[in-house]
Structures are given as structure tokens and as C-alpha cells.
Image: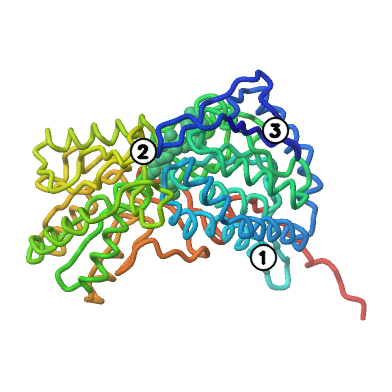
Amino acid sequence: MKRILNYINGAFAAPIKGSYLKLYNPALGLVYAEAPDSDEADMQLAIDAAQKAFPAWSNLTTDKRHEYLSAIAQKITDNLEDLALAESIDNGKPLALAKAVDIPRASSNFKFFANAITQFSSEAHEMKGTAINYTLRKPLGVVGCISPWNLPLYLFTWKIAPALAAGNTVVAKPSEVTPMTAFLLAEICIEVGLPKGVLNIVHGLGEKTGAVLSAHPQIKAISFTGSTKVGGAIASIAAPLFKKLSLEMGGKNPNIIFADCDYEKMIETTLKSSFANQGQICLCGSRILIEKSIYEKFKNDFVERTKALKVGNPLSEDTQVGAVVSKPHFDKIKQYIDLAQKEGGNLLCGGKAVKPQGHEEGWFIEPTVIEGLSMDCRTNQEEIFGPVVTLIPFETDAEALALANESNYGLSATIWTQNLNRAHQMADEIEAGIVWVNTWLMRDLRTPFGGMKNSGVGREGGLEALRFFTEPKNICIDYTKHKLNS
Ligand code: NAD
């Protein structure tokens, strides 16, 4: 059985206590590997290594840091096939998705921040004839990055790349549910000769390893992506220690469909925004609001296309919906489907476990569409994070807006309309950090990424990430009294 290891001070390290966690292949429901069940002592080694590496790494020229990060980006691209396969086996996602999205994006994350750091500048504020202020952007020191299981390498690198680019050294903790590609990233870092201690990857349970990282006095900032509950727990520990915090958390995103939309584009994209990655994307549009005049047509077409989605072996080229990530998550999704029916929801399709041939023990769930629920019920308020969407009709723009905003979450929203004024007005008033009009998941890495309300604090992406991972220091020079020699 494959055993993965921590990556500390430039080398692989077994957990000090020798304890390991089981890793499951969700498509088979079987243990296939094991990962360190690290504790405080392992974390301390990683933090010490990062601390020691900080002076040299933070004093490197940006050109040199650019070279290291570009080399990592290139290696990820070179290893696309192996990384995608590992991601699919570890997570249950379709291999085709890992090849097309997860791994290319992990490479882009490094490439983007390798380039961004060479363009990062700070401000000067002149007090005419009196003084000049200039602002330095100093790296923070050792920072912690904690990531979830739904887009394992994609989100792990989205945090690590800007942290390293800005001159910090990093201790990173991937999800214990899907740590395999983080381990493979460590191999890449060794291959490209990343100086030891600059990046350290410690595997283990959130409440054990992750909590140590969040509470550690030497960690200057925590960049976290995961559930709102855990984000709150981290904030309660890290905030009183005055650590910088970036929290990217859950979503219950509205997908608002007006009758005047480009229908074919909308329905094709809505299938993806509902069920891509088994609905396990924080940006999935799980609350579908439909203008009443096209409700019945949409419902029939959408259900028909949902039923046609191919659920099965993630490694098959034609699979559209793979396995959900774990048995506990499978059970949670099933409980929500039961709850939706208890709350009075009408199951239009899906709802059952699927047992594809040769994968009878895997954790597959049919894509599920439910109607007939009010916005205030638990099904429409809580994040299910699975292949489950609800349909809700509306009559006016104002009603659509009110329904969309009736949520404690505020991560993203999608609006489908050809009416420019409506699009701008809705986009302006909707309570979400990211709004897509006539598209979904279109990303420009320069733009701010993050949520409002219970979906997040702070923004990632582009210069926002480089600002988060640096501390501004203003220097004011008074030059009034100096007389120029003539
Ligand atoms: P999770 O919150 O359970 O775990 C996320 C990470 O935090 C894991 O590495 C976990 O080990 C760690 N962790 C758990 N308890 C901890 C603690 N007490 N202290 C420190 N670290 C701890 O989330 P998950 O189940 O892995 O991922 C799914 C969630 O992530 C969903 O809510 C989803 O919406 C969210 N998510 C948000 C975004 C975004 O950008 N906003 C992106 C992807 C996923």
C-alpha cells in the first residue's frame, strides 16, 4: 500500500509518532494508501524549518523567486497525466475534469504568481516641498495555508503560490481526505531544487494538525479555505493572537434565470453549475431561481438532461458525474435529500445511491433535482455540497433579488438575462462577492475572489493575495530643512 510522507525542511519525513490515516478511493470505497497522522511535534519541525528558511527566501530577488515558481508550474504541466490520475483516484472526481481543470489550474496558479510578483509595486505619497512617504510591502514571515478536499491541488496551490511569491515561507496543511497531490507537489519541489524549508507540507487531521497551525505564535497569517464552521473555529483562535486571516468558506449560491436569457447556453451551463465535481464546488449554483413564465419548460428540459448525465467510474472518458468524496459525506448528502422530502420537497429526479458495475462499494449519488420548497427551509439555507439542487419560481426582479439574498451565505451568484439594465442592477444589489452574468466559473486570476456574509473574510486572487501576504510599512522622509548647494 502506498504511504505518503510529510515534506519538512526540503525532505520527506515520517510522522514522529509513526501513526497514519487511511486514504480511501471513493469510487471503490476501499482504502488504497495512508498518510501521516501528524501532531504538534511534526508541526513544530515544519515551523522551525520555515522560520530558518525565511531570511534567505525573503531576501531573494523577485526574479529568482519567479524562476522557482515558474519551474514548479512547468513541472506540474509536465506531470499533468499522473497528477490528474492521482487526483481522480483520491477524490472520486472524473479524470477528464482533473485533466481539464484541476491540474492545469494548479500550474496556472504558480505561473500567475511567478509573473505577478515581478509586477508588484508599492506606493509613494509626496508632500510637496516637505516630505516623501514611500510604502514597503514586507513579507510576513512564516504563514499557514489550510485547504479543503473538493479541489485539492487547485486550492492548495492557490494559497501557496502567492505566499511564496511575496517572500514568505509556508507551512501548508492539505485536507486529510485528499492529500495525495500535495505529496506529489512536494516531489516536484524537491526536483526543482526549491530551497529547503521554504515550503513545508504537514499531513494530518484538521482538529489536530490544523488547529496547532492556527494557534501557533510563530505563524503570522492563516489562509484558510473550507467550511464556515471550521473557519469560525480558526478565527476564534487566530484573531486574539492578531494573525492576519483570509477565510474562504461555504456557499449556497443562487442561479437566477430570466425568461429572456440565451436558453441553450443557460441550460447547458446550469447543468455544470449544478453538478460539476458532483456539486462539490463552493461556487455551484444550488438554488436555481426561475422566472415563472419559463418554469415548466425549464423544469422539464433540465430534469431530462439531468437524468441523461452519466454517473460512474471516474476513470472512464465519458463519465460526467463521479463519486462523492467519502462515506461520511455520502451519508450527509443522503440525509439532506431525506430532509428535503420531509420538508415537503418534491423529488423530480435522482436522490438514490448509484452502484456502477465494478464500483458497487463506491459512493455515488444520482444528480438530484427538488422543487416545492420555500426559501427559508433548511434545504435551501444549509450548504449540502453535493449533486443536489432546488428549483424555485419567481415573478418579478424584486422577488428574485429578495430570494437570492435570503441567505446567510454570499459567495457567488449567476444571472441569466439579455437585459443589460437588469443585469447591472441585479449584479449591483446581489449580496455576493462574485457575480457572473450569462456565464459560470469564468475566472481571471487577477480579479478579487471571495465571499460576503458567512462565506468569507478577505479576498484572494491577483494583487489582493499579494497584499494579504505582505505587511505595508510606510517610511516618511522630511526634506524641508536641507538647503541645496548652488
Ligand atoms: P473543512 O472546513 O472540514 O476542512 C477544510 C480544512 O480545514 C481541512 O484541511 C481540514 O483538515 C482543516 N480543519 C478542520 N478542522 C480544523 C481546525 N479545527 N483547525 C484548523 N484546521 C481545521 O472543509 P472541507 O469539508 O474540507 O471542504 C468543504 C467546504 O469547503 C465547503 O463548505 C465548501 O464550500 C468550502 N469551500 C470554500 C471555497 C471558497 O473558496 N470559498 C472553496 C472550496 C471549498
Of the residues under marks 3 and 2, which one precedes in the sequence? Answer: 3
Asked whether 419 or 457 is in front, the reply is: 419
Relative horizontal placement of residue 386, taking residue 175 as reference (left or right)? left
Task: Provide residue 427's location: percent of width, then percent of height.
Answer: 30, 65
Q: Quadrant of ligand 1?
A: top left
- Marks 3/1: CA distance? 30 Å
Residue occupying the point 62% across, 55% down? 79
Task: Provide residue 438's location: percent of width, then percent of height.
Answer: 29, 69
For discs 1 and 2, the disc positioned in front in the rendered view: 2
Residue lying at the far right in this picture: please name it: 486
The numbered disc on residue 121 is 1
User: Which residue is the site of mark 2?
Assistant: 359
For discs 3 and 1, the disc positioned in front in the rendered view: 3
- Marks 1/2: CA distance? 53 Å
Q: Amino acid at mark 2?
A: His
Q: Amino acid at mark 3?
A: Ala
> For the N terminus, which image quadrant?
top right
Residue lying at the far front in this picture: please name it: 358
Label 1 sits on a secondary structure element that is loop
